[in-house]
Image (spheres, rainbow, N blue to C red):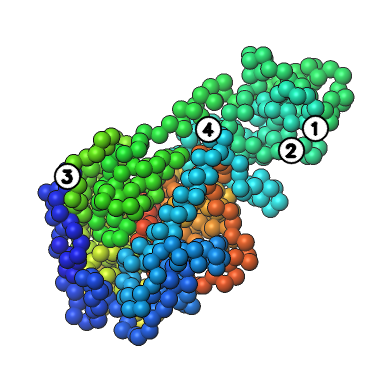
């Protein structure tokens, strides 16, 4: 039982973790001012007075815990929601939720339980609207709200190839699809009342999407069009002949040649087309093993330090909408996310686990089989290994644009570590987070310095610029040995400036138009188009939260377009750790200098 968390019910559950109890939380340092609210213990960051009201959800809280310098919003999600939905959305959110009480509520930096509850109702209403829209569609390939083709052509952009994303449909069998490949498609340039087809060639490729040009137009771009290569309307050359479908040249050029058959024979000799089983492979790759009502263990978004049981409610393109047991709160992640595990995982490694009062499974519930979850590398903990108190650098899971000074708080089994951000640690340890030792989100001391990345020092640390040697001496601590970190760098294929679709890990239900702006070996800096750089996120090149251009259209997931400049002109600058606790990211590996090659990514410690 947590100190100060007497209101939290963590009793027996029917899962295999039911015999575990949570570890004791380190005692609260006497030097930290403490505020108790509704049975929970919070640390007041600096003791300054002052309250603020969120302009989005109406929540009242400690001003210093609010998001940004302007303190207009309690989180980045409220800031974005306010910017994109204007004052109308703000008013609706307040009407749909409970109005703020006159009594000021103290908001803990992490987690913001009261804020989460207020925002959850707004999220739920938005999700219901989105689900209703998706169900109303006539096909699994929805009409795009965002025109990727126009966006790419007007700005001469490059999309990351599908082969960069091994976790997506066709990611492992995309083959050598490239410019010049021919396909058979519907002929839209005709007056005929029946469906007719013609051959087109790929002029430009961006993810799943291709710019096609009908054969016979040569360098004329007037009839060029963009299409997702994985939709049922795209066929290999020869499909019409085997299916008895007519090939008819476009009316704009029908008189250009007197013998179209001879023209096609000449143009197609030696040309490449789609594999004959391409459509079958797409269909096979669109089948996902996770099913509704499967039970999993997932990180508790209100307390990062523990997991709890959740049920799969929805599966879209491999992304799972999970609903916590005994709760209506949901959590989005990919089926290969390191945040979800088989039932019993927490018990097996010694991770904290929140028990529930559910005595038996409802009809249809089944524990998700262990082989469905992402595998981590085996590690040898018998020799030199991580120890409690060792220092390192880590991506802050509550502010993914920052790499911070961090500490190993507890060593778990199977290579897992509990880590905390120095200077921003909750008094009860509820914001400790779990990374595997091979995670690309942790780095040896000195990684940021050698790779010219800004390292975020502990909050309140005044000896700037930050120097590791001085800090280790002042804190009487040691840095984790460099050899314990994973230095594997795959040939991922990403290049600076490539476009893609990326999950906003601070609000993981959203998939947004994004750009790779920096590459540090396997570490990618992801920028969300239209938003300020403060919202960038560090993500691993093999992250299951990155997708090729056209993934949303293929799977039926809603894509968030770039924010218009008018929508973000009032967006506050990010200066504090983000206050929502839903979103963390880790998966094996490590990164280096701005290339795909290997090299030295650390510096020697000063004597």
- Residue 21 in the figure: left or right of residue 155: left
Marks 1/2 in contact by CB < 8 Å: the verdict is yes
Q: CA distance from mark 1 to mark 2?
A: 9 Å
- Residue position for label 1: 217
Q: Is residue 223 above or below residue 452?
A: above
- Residue position for label 3: 359
Marks 2/4 in contact by CB < 8 Å: the verdict is no
Dot 2: what SS?
Answer: loop
- Residue position for label 2: 224
Classify mark 1: residues with Cα within 10 Å, few (<14), some (14-19) or many (20+).
some
Q: Earlier in the sequence, mark 1 or mark 3?
A: 1
Marks 1/3 in contact by CB < 8 Å: the verdict is no
Q: Earlier in the sequence, mark 1 or mark 2?
A: 1
- Residue position for label 4: 174
Residue 359, image quadrant: top left
Q: Can you tell which of label 3 and label 4 is closer to the viewer?
A: 3
């Amino acid at each position: 039982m947590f100190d100060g968390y007497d209101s939290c019910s963590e009793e027996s559950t029917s899962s295999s973790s039911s015999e575990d109890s949570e570890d004791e939380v380190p005692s609260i340092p006497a030097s930290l001012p403490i505020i108790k609210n509704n049975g929970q213990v919070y640390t007041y960051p600096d003791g300054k007075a002052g309250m603020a009201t969120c302009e989005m959800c109406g929540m009242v809280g400690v001003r210093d815990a609010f998001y940004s310098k302007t303190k207009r919003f309690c989180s980045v999600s409220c800031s974005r929601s306010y910017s994109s939905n204007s004052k109308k959305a703000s008013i609706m959110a307040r009407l749909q939720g409970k109005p703020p009480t006159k009594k000021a509520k103290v908001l803990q930096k992490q987690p913001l339980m009261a804020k989460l509850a207020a925002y959850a109702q707004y999220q739920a209403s938005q999700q219901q609207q989105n689900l209703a829209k998706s169900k109303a569609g006539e096909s699994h390939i929805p009409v795009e709200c965002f025109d990727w083709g126009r966006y790419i052509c007007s700005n001469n952009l490059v999309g990351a190839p599908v082969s960069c994303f091994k976790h997506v449909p066709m990611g492992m069998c995309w083959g050598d699809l490239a410019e010049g490949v021919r396909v058979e498609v519907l002929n839209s340039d005709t007056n005929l009342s029946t469906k007719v087809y013609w051959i087109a060639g790929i002029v430009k490729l961006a993810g799943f999407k291709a710019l096609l040009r009908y054969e016979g137009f040569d360098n004329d771009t007037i009839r060029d069009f963009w299409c997702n290569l994985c939709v049922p309307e795209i066929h290999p050359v020869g499909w019409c002949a085997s299916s008895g479908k007519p090939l008819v040249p476009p009316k704009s050029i029908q008189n250009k040649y007197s013998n179209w058959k001879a023209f096609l024979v000449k143009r197609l000799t030696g040309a490449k087309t789609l594999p004959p089983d391409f459509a079958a492979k797409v269909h096979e790759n669109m089948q996902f093993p996770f099913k509704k009502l499967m039970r999993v263990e997932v990180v508790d978004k209100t307390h990062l330090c523990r997991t709890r049981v959740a049920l799969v409610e929805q599966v879209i393109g491999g992304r799972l909408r999970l609903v916590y047991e005994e709760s209506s709160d949901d959590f989005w992640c990919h089926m290969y996310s390191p945040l979800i595990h088989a039932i019993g995982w927490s018990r097996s490694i010694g991770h904290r686990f929140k028990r529930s009062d559910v005595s038996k499974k409802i009809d249809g519930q089944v524990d998700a089989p262990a082989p469905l979850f992402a595998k981590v590398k085996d590690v040898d903990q018998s020799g030199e290994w991580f120890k409690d108190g060792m220092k390192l650098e880590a991506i802050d899971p509550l502010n993914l644009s920052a790499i911070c000074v961090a500490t190993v708080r507890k060593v778990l089994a199977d290579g897992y570590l509990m880590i905390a951000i120095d200077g921003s640690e909750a008094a009860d340890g509820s914001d400790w987070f779990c990374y595997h030792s091979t995670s690309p989100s942790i780095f040896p001391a000195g990684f940021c310095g050698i790779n010219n990345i800004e390292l975020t020092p502990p909050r309140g640390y005044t000896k700037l610029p930050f120097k590791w040697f001085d800090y280790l001496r002042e804190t009487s601590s040691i840095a984790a040995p460099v050899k314990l970190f994973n230095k594997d760098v795959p040939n991922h294929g990403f290049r600076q400036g490539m476009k893609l679709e990326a999950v906003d890990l601070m609000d993981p239900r959203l998939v947004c138009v994004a750009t790779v702006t920096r590459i540090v070996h396997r570490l990618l800096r992801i920028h969300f188009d239209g938003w300020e750089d403060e919202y960038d996120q560090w993500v691993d090149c093999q992250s299951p939260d990155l997708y090729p251009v056209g993934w949303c259209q293929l799977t039926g997931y809603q894509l968030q377009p770039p924010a218009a400049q008018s929508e973000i002109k009032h967006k506050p600058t990010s200066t504090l750790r983000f206050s929502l606790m839903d979103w963390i990211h880790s998966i094996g590996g490590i990164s280096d200098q701005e290339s795909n090659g290997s090299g030295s990514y650390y510096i020697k410690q000063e004597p």
